[in-house]
C-alpha cells in the first residue's frame, strides 16, 4: 500500500487498500455509513466497494443522476434531504464513490450538513484520482459557472484503486489524462515524456503514473495551501479551459465538453500565450500542441464565440479587482503567476489552435 | 469601546465602534464591499450604517425578504447569484447587517462563495447581538428543520451597537431577552436576577447587560470550541424549543413563534425536567416559570401536537445514534449534558407548563 500524508486528507493507493478502509471505518465507529454514488457508479462501482467491505459494515445508499449538469445546489438539496430522512447525525460517515462531480458535491454536502460530518472519498474516474483526490477543494456550479459555491476541507482519507478505471468509458479516461499532462507541464518535463506512452501502459505502469500525478499535486498543495503562489499553477490552462467548458455547457449550439477536453484546449492556448509573453520554447510549443491534438478533439470557435468565452473569464475565481489572472510558463516547471493577458493575444491563441497543422 | 477577543471573531461594542469599522475596512483593502440586508434593515439600519462610514467607502447592497421563512438555500442561491452578477471576487468583503437570519445566512453565503470571502457581522436585533454574534456558527434551514445546513467559521469581526435596538419592534426585542435569560440559567443566578429588571433599564444598563451576555457566551465557546462538553449548555431549552419552533412554522393551524418565544417555552420544560431528574430546586423552578410566563405568551399544545413535537426531536443536530440528548440543570450554572429523557416526562413537562398558575 502507498500513502501520501498522515493526517486529514491522507491518500492511500494500491490494490491492497481495502483492509485500511475497513480499519478506518471501524476506528471511526460511525453511527451510520452513507455511500453517495451517481447512477453509473451505483451500478458499476458500488458492488466492487461492497465486495471489499467487511460484512459487519452496513451502508445506506444515496444516488444522484450522473453528469456535470447535476453538480448543482438543487442536487445538494436532494442529498441533504435524503441524509436528513435517513436520520444522519454528526457522528455519521459519508463515503463519496464516483468521479469528480461526486467527490466535489459529496464533500460539500458533508462539510455543510449539520455544520459538518466526516467523509471519505473513493475516486473512480482518472480525473478524480489525479485531481480531485488532493487539496480539499469541493463544491458545485452556480448556473453555468463552475465551482462557484464550495469550501476547502479535507476528507478523513482518500482511497485510490486504479481497478475502478476498468469501469470507465475511454473518453472519461482521456479527461483525466489532460490533468496528468498539466502536472507534467507545471512540474516536470521528464514526467510529461513518460506520459506520452500513457495509452499503452500496463496496469502497473498506469498505477505508477497516476501516483506520480497525485504526488506532484500534493507537493504543490502542501507548499502553498492557501493559494498565494505556487498552488495557482494547478490552474494552468484552466482560466480559458473553464470558460470554454462553461460556454459549451451554456450554448445551445454546442455539445458539452468533458473537463479534460476543455482544459486540453486551455493548455494549448496557454502554451501559445506563454510562448508569446514569456518565450516558452517554440519547439516545445509545437510538440505539446501536436500531442494534445493527437489525443483530444479539436473544437473550433468563431469570433463571436471567442468574445463570449472572454466575457466568461470575469467569473474566474482567481480574479481580483476585475483583472483576469493567468498562470503562464517560461518552460516546463518554470511558471509565472498573476499575469494579465491582452484580449488580442487570446484571439491570436485561438487562431493558432484552429490552424495548427501536425 | 469594549472588545472581546483579538483574532478572527473579535467583538467590538459601544457607540464608538465606527472608527474601528472604518479602519478595519480600509486595512482589509477589499476589491468591493457588499452589504446584505433584509427588507427591514435596508430601510431602518442601512442609513444608520452609511452615516457612520467614511465617504470614500462605497458599498453595493443586496436585500432579501425579512423573516425566518426566507432562511433557506433558495435565498442563498439568490444572494450567490447577485454576488456573482456584481463581480464579487475573493478579495471582496461582505457586511451582514441584520438580525440572526441575516448574520447566519450571510455568513454561510460568504463562507461558501468562491470557497470563502471575508465577512463582518453587524447584528441589529437583540437576539443576534447576544446569540449569533459569538461562536462562528452560521447556516440556513432545510425545509422546517432549523440550521441543518451550515459551517462554523468566524467573521473577520462583529460590531455591536445597541442603538440599532431602537429600530426593533418590541416582540423581536423580547426574543433576544429569552437568550439572555438562558445565559443566566446556565452561568449565573446573579445575572438572572439582574435581568429581571430588563424592561426598565436605561440604555447604559441595557448595553451593560447585553455585553455580559456576550461575555458569557464567549467564555463558554472559547473553553469548548468543538462542542464536546460545556458548549452544549448553550443549547439549554433549545432541544424542545427548536422542535416547537419547527412545529409552529410547519403547522397550518399555528402562527409561527419567534425563536425566543419558542425557547422560553423550551426552558420552562427543561427546568421542569431538570427538577424531576436532577432535583433543580423547586422554588427556583416556580420563580423562573413565573418570570417566563410573565414575559412570554403561553402556547398550549394538545397531546397529538406534543407527539408531533417529540417526533421532530430526532432532527436535533446534537443527537447521536438516534438518542435525543438534553442539557439539564442541577441548579443555576450547574449542568449535566447528554441526558436521555423519557417521553412520558416530556408530556408531564408540557402539562406542568400548561397548568402553571402564578
Image (cartoon, coloured by chain):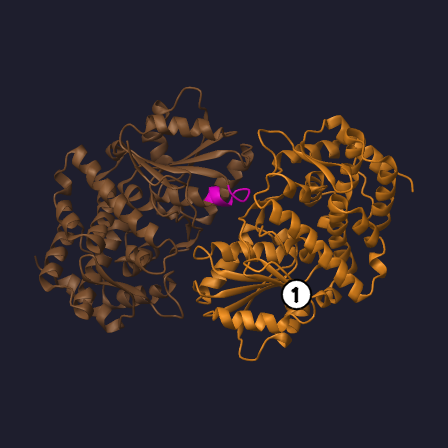
Chain colours: A brown, B orange
Residue A337 visible, this angle: yes
Locate the N terminus of chain B by quadrant.
Answer: bottom right
Locate the C terminus of chain B by quadrant.
Answer: top right
Q: Nearer the viewer, residue B140 or A350?
A: B140
Q: Is residue B146 left or right of residue A331?
A: right
Residue B250 visible, this angle: no
Query: Per the image, is A112 magenta?
Result: yes
Residue that mark 1 sits on:
B41
Magenta segment boundaries in residue numbering: A109-116
A321 w.r.t. A14: above or below: below
| Residue at the bottom extreme, as displayed | B55
Q: Nearer the viewer, residue B56 or B23?
A: B23
| Residue at the right extreme, as displayed | B358
Q: Nearer the viewer, residue A255 or B344?
A: B344
* Residue A181 placement (x, y as % from top left): 20, 50
Residue at (49% x, 41% y) in the render:
A78
Quarter of the image where one finds residue B356: top right
* Residue A355 placement (x, y as % from top left): 13, 63
Q: Nearer the viewer, residue A236 or B189?
A: B189
Q: Is residue B269 left or right of residue A277?
A: right
- Provide the secondary structure element on which disc 1 rests: helix
Disc 1 chain ID: B
Quarter of the image where one finds residue A288: bottom left
Query: Per the image, is B173 magenta?
Result: no
B281 w.r.t. B292: above or below: above
Residue at (74% x, 46% y) in the render:
B187
Residue at (26% x, 73% y) in the render:
A342
Residue at (75% x, 52% y) in the render:
B180
* Residue A50 placement (x, y as % from top left): 37, 25
* Residue A35 placement (x, y as % from top left): 43, 33
Amino acid at each position: 500500500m502507498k500513502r501520501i500524508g498522515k493526517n486529514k486528507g491522507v491518500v492511500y493507493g494500491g490494490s491492497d487498500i481495502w483492509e485500511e478502509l475497513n480499519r478506518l471505518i471501524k476506528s471511526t465507529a460511525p453511527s451510520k455509513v452513507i455511500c453517495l454514488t451517481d447512477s453509473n457508479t451505483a451500478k458499476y462501482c458500488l458492488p466492487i466497494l461492497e465486495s471489499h467491505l467487511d460484512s459487519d459494515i452496513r451502508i445506506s445508499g444515496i444516488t444522484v443522476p450522473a453528469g456535470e449538469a447535476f453538480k448543482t445546489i438543487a442536487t445538494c438539496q436532494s442529498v441533504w434531504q435524503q441524509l436528513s430522512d435517513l436520520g444522519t447525525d454528526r457522528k455519521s460517515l459519508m463515503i463519496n464513490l464516483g468521479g469528480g462531480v461526486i467527490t466535489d458535491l459529496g464533500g460539500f454536502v458533508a462539510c455543510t450538513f449539520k455544520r459538518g460530518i466526516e467523509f471519505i472519498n473513493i475516486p473512480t474516474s482518472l480525473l478524480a484520482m489525479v485531481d480531485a483526490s488532493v487539496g480539499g477543494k469541493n463544491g458545485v456550479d452556480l448556473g453555468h459557472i463552475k465551482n462557484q459555491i464550495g469550501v476547502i476541507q479535507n476528507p478523513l482519507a482518500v482511497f485510490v484503486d486504479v481497478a475502478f478505471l476498468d469501469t470507465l468509458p475511454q473518453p472519461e479516461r482521456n479527461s483525466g489524462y489532460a490533468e496528468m499532462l498539466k502536472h507534467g507541464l507545471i512540474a516536470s518535463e521528464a514526467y510529461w515524456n513518460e506520459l506520452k506512452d500513457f495509452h499503452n501502459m500496463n496496469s502497473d505502469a498506469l498505477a505508477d503514473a497516476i501516483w506520480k500525478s497525485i504526488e506532484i499535486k500534493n507537493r504543490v498543495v502542501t507548499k502553498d495551501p492557501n493559494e498565494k503562489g505556487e498552488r495557482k499553477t494547478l490552474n494552468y490552462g484552466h482560466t480559458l479551459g473553464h470558460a470554454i467548458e462553461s460556454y459549451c455547457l451554456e450554448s445551445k449550439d454546442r455539445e458539452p465538453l468533458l473537463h479534460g477536453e476543455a482544459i486540453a484546449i486551455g493548455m494549448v492556448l496557454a502554451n501559445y500565450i506563454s510562448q508569446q509573453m514569456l518565450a516558452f520554447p517554440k519547439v516545445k510549443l509545437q510538440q505539446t500542441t501536436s500531442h494534445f491534438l493527437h489525443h483530444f478533439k479539436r473544437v473550433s470557435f468563431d469570433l463571436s464565440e471567442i468574445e463570449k468565452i472572454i466575457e466568461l473569464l470575469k467569473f474566474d475565481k482567481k480574479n481580483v479587482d476585475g483583472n483576469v489572472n493567468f498562470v503562464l510558463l517560461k518552460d516546463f516547471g518554470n511558471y509565472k503567476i498573476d499575469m494579465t493577458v491582452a484580449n488580442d493575444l487570446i484571439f491570436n491563441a485561438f487562431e493558432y489552435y484552429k490552424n495548427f497543422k501536425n
